[in-house]
Each structure stands twice: as C-alpha cells, then as structure tokens.
Amino acid sequence: MASSSGAAAADVGATAAITVERKPATARLLELGVRSWPKWGGPPGRYALSYGARQTCYIVRGKASATVEGSPESSSTAQFGAGDLVVFARGTRCTWHIVAAVDMHYAFDPS
C-alpha cells in the first residue's frame, strides 16, 4: 500500500506497478509541464483500467485508490488524492475506486 507519513512534502509510496509522489514541489510540476497535459475527470465509482504505456497523472482534486489486478488487495492498493503525482507502469491492470470526483492532468510515456 502506498505510504503517507504526512511529514515530508515529497513522500513517495509505491506498489510494484503504481508509484505515488505526495505533494511534489511546484518546481517539479513545472519541469514536467503538468499544466500542459490533457485533462480527465471522473465521478465516484469503480473503473477497470489497463495501461499499454506508462502513464503519469497529477491529481488536481478528488480522492481515489487503485488496486492492481491479481494481487492481494492489502499489498497492491495505492491511495492518492489532490496534489499527488501518480505513475502507472506499462502493463498495469488495475481497478480505480474513486471516492470523491477526480480531476487530473495526465501524460503517456512515448516509449
């Protein structure tokens, strides 16, 4: 499960397929060009997703978790919300559980 100590501004948690960077610095977001990425939004619910390429998401608002398919839930669930940078590895198959409507910017790795 993704960790959240609350002590560090850039706390990083990870599962094998999902990495969550808690509240990255503004300079990091500018370097990545997050605000120029396309936007997506989703209402509360469950969504099965598969990533054919590495995807990075910056969560603008909302709260969700993603559980990697085929793994015990306790060891493969990442929780994330507003202000978090989330990376889904290529080939990841997971189910998102959106608790509070999500708005995010996203980018796929071209490789």
Image: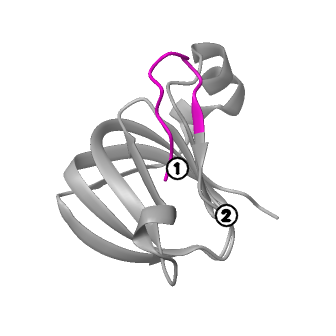
Characterize the magenta stretch by its predominant secondary structure: loop
Q: Position of residue 28 (x, y in %)?
A: 67, 22
- Out of 47 and 108, give the one closest to the viewer: 47
Number of callouts in the render?
2
Discs 2, 1 touching: Cβ within 8 Å: no
Q: What segment carries the magenta color?
A: 1-12
Give percent across and percent down for residue 51.
58, 73
Asked which quadrant contains residue 29, the reply is top right
Relative to 79, is 45 on the left or the right?
left
Residue 65: quarter of image: bottom left
Of 66 and 76, nearer the camera is 76
List the single residue furthest toward the right.
111
Amino acid of disc 1 = Tyr
In magenta stretch: residue 96: no
**Does any portion of residue 52 appear in the rendered image?**
yes
Q: Which residue is mark 1?
A: 106
- Give the structural element (helix, strand or loop) at label 1: strand
Return the residue at label 2: 89
Residue positioned 50% across, 16% down in the render: 7
Disc 2 versus disc 1: distance between alpha carbons? 13 Å
| Residue 9 within the magenta-colored segment of the rendering | yes
Mark 2 vs 1, N-terminal side: 2
Give me the residue at 46% from left, 75% from top. Answer: 72
